[in-house]
Amino acid sequence: GKLMSLFSLKHPLPYRLIPENFDEFVGQEHIVGKNKPLRKLVEKGTIFSTIFYGPPGTGKTALARLISKKLKGEFIEINAVLSTVNDLRKNLERGRKNFQIGKRTILFIDEIHRFNKAQQEVLLPDLEAGTIVLIGASTENPFFSLVPAMRSRTKIYEFKPLKVNDLKRLYRIAVSKKEIEDFADEEVVEFLARESAGEARKFLTFIEELYILSEGKR
């Protein structure tokens, strides 16, 4: 009994559904649609420093991880709230070392708007020299939260809240990947999609709770 249940612990559904490729990525067609520049660059095996800006649960981190999977190199993920200037310097140093041996470094900084001016400026020389590729995620408008020098060295992509149909598609993906059984009827999925206000994380958490409550085997 008890022992078995320990081993059946799983990551939450939103985590288990982090997209493996562009076809599994839901929403943000204006950024990752078939012929959009960002997607084309990544498919050609390259990317420039970028800032993803938009509400929570719209795929900023998911896209950063997807890009890192597609591109060869080292992916370093930090959170601006939790990391010190010292951490930052260490990661940049690592990027320089990688660069010298011809290896790419993608530095993903979540909540980059929480970096103050001084912290942002530590990044500039490496952005300038191209020794790292920065992907920053921000829920705040970079126009107000980033220093002009950072803005001029990065490409800014705005993420939009997901549409109801995007979220409904997420449900289908979860079922097709056998992460859940197909247990909810169309109206329920539609209702939860509307309640989620464009956030994938919120939607998938609703779905998972309902799935467990409906006796679904998790």
Image (tube, rainbow, N blue to C red):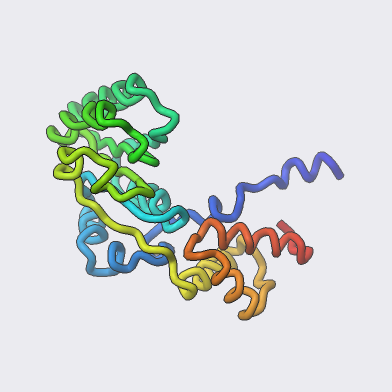
Q: Position of residue 181 (x, y in %)?
A: 67, 68
Q: Is residue 30 above or below residue 75?
A: below
The answer, for residue 171, to whether it is visible in the render is yes
In the image, 90 versus 140, the foreground residue is 140
Q: Quadrant of residue 214?
A: bottom right
Q: Is residue 87 above or below residue 133?
A: above
Tell me: 56 left or right of 2. Answer: left
Q: Residue at x 55, y 70 (%)?
A: 193
> Considering the image in quadrants, where does the N terminus appear?
top right
Q: Is residue 108 above or below residue 22?
A: above
Q: Residue at x 56, y 58 (%)?
A: 202
Q: Position of residue 98 (x, y in %)?
A: 24, 29
Q: Position of residue 22 (x, y in %)?
A: 36, 62
Q: Position of residue 31 (x, y in %)?
A: 28, 62
Q: Is residue 193 above or below residue 57?
A: below
> Considering the image in quadrants, where does the C terminus appear?
bottom right
Q: Residue at x 61, y 60 (%)?
A: 179
Tell me: 218 left or right of 111. Answer: right
Tell me: 50 left or right of 13. Answer: left
In the image, 109 versus 18, the foreground residue is 109
Q: Residue at x 55, y 64 (%)?
A: 196
* Residue furthest to the front: 144
* Residue furthest to the right: 1
Q: Quadrant of residue 122?
A: top left
